[in-house]
């Protein structure tokens, strides 16, 4: 249906996909989309991933899983790979600086997969309470292949002091 209707898909790989399908399965799908003239966007898995984890073993598993997604992304040649840095103030209590250092190490290692491509990493907010948590990451990566993807749903669900307005209601802070 995607090919018949000419829909440019966003492809997401979760842990089951990474473990259940072969590289050849993914290659065939990528070729079918390319033959149909469709471009795609890849979305990295979210639950359980911690690019800036303080525990090195958790970070190692995260990097291995993300590496698998980035390797598959080379088959699909997407315009973007949506990634989730996932800074969560409840988990990284007083550890924002350490999270940043660890996260930088993770994303710099993955940027190597995009060398010579036009694919960008779109860093999407999830649990971050505001831009002050992702801005240092984006600034430090300082790459034209890293951009910010603002998810309004995540901002409203997890953000702090997000101001929004409903029809006919005065502005009020969302907490």
Image: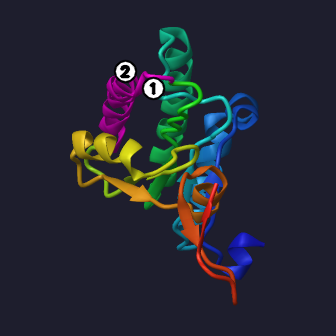
**Residue 26 at what x, y percent from top left?**
63, 45
The circle drawn on residue 52 is 1
* Label 2 packing within 10 angstroms: few (<14), some (14-19), many (20+): some
Q: Are marks 1 and 2 in contact (CB under 8 Å)?
A: yes
Task: Read off the magenta span.
Answer: 93-114
Q: Is residue 51 magenta?
A: no
Q: Is residue 49 left or right of residue 54?
A: right
Camera-side mark, 1 or 2: 2
Please, which colouring scheme is shown?
A: rainbow
Nearest the eye: 126 or 74: 126
In terms of secondary structure, where does tag 2 sit? helix
Residue 44 seen: yes
- Mark 2 = which residue? 98
Task: Note whether 148 is above or below 46 in the view shown.
Answer: below
Residue 134 seen: no
Q: Is residue 100 magenta?
A: yes
In terms of secondary structure, where does tag 1 sit? loop
**Residue 81 at what x, y percent from top left?**
48, 51
* Residue at figure coordinates x 71%, y 81% from the top left: 5
Nearest the eye: 114 or 76: 114
* Label 1 packing within 10 angstroms: few (<14), some (14-19), many (20+): many
**Residue 21 at what x, y percent from top left?**
72, 35
Q: Most prominent secondary structure in the magenta stretch?
A: helix
Q: Is residue 98 left or right of residue 54?
A: left
Nearest the eye: 24 or 7: 7
* Residue at figure coordinates x 68%, y 43% from the top left: 25
Picture quadrant where residue 163 is located = bottom right
* Residue at figure coordinates x 21%, y 46% from the top left: 142
């Amino acid at each position: 249906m995607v090919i018949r209707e000419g829909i440019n898909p966003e492809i997401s790989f979760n842990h089951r996909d990474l473990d259940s399908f072969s590289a050849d399965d993914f290659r065939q799908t990528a070729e079918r989309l390319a033959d149909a003239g469709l471009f795609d966007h890849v979305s990295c898995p979210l639950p359980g991933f911690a690019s800036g984890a303080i525990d090195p073993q958790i970070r190692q598993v995260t990097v291995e899983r993300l590496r698998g997604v980035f390797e598959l992304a080379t088959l699909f040649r997407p315009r973007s790979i949506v990634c989730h840095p996932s800074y969560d103030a409840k988990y990284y209590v007083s550890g924002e600086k350490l999270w940043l250092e660890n996260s930088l190490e993770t994303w710099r290692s993955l940027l190597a997969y995009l060398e010579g491509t036009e694919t960008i990493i779109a860093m999407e907010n999830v649990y971050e309470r505001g831009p002050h948590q992702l801005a240092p990451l984006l600034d430090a990566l300082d790459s034209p292949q890293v951009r910010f993807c603002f998810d309004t749903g995540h901002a409203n669900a997890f953000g702090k002091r997000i101001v929004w307005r409903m029809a006919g209601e005065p502005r009020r802070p969302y907490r």
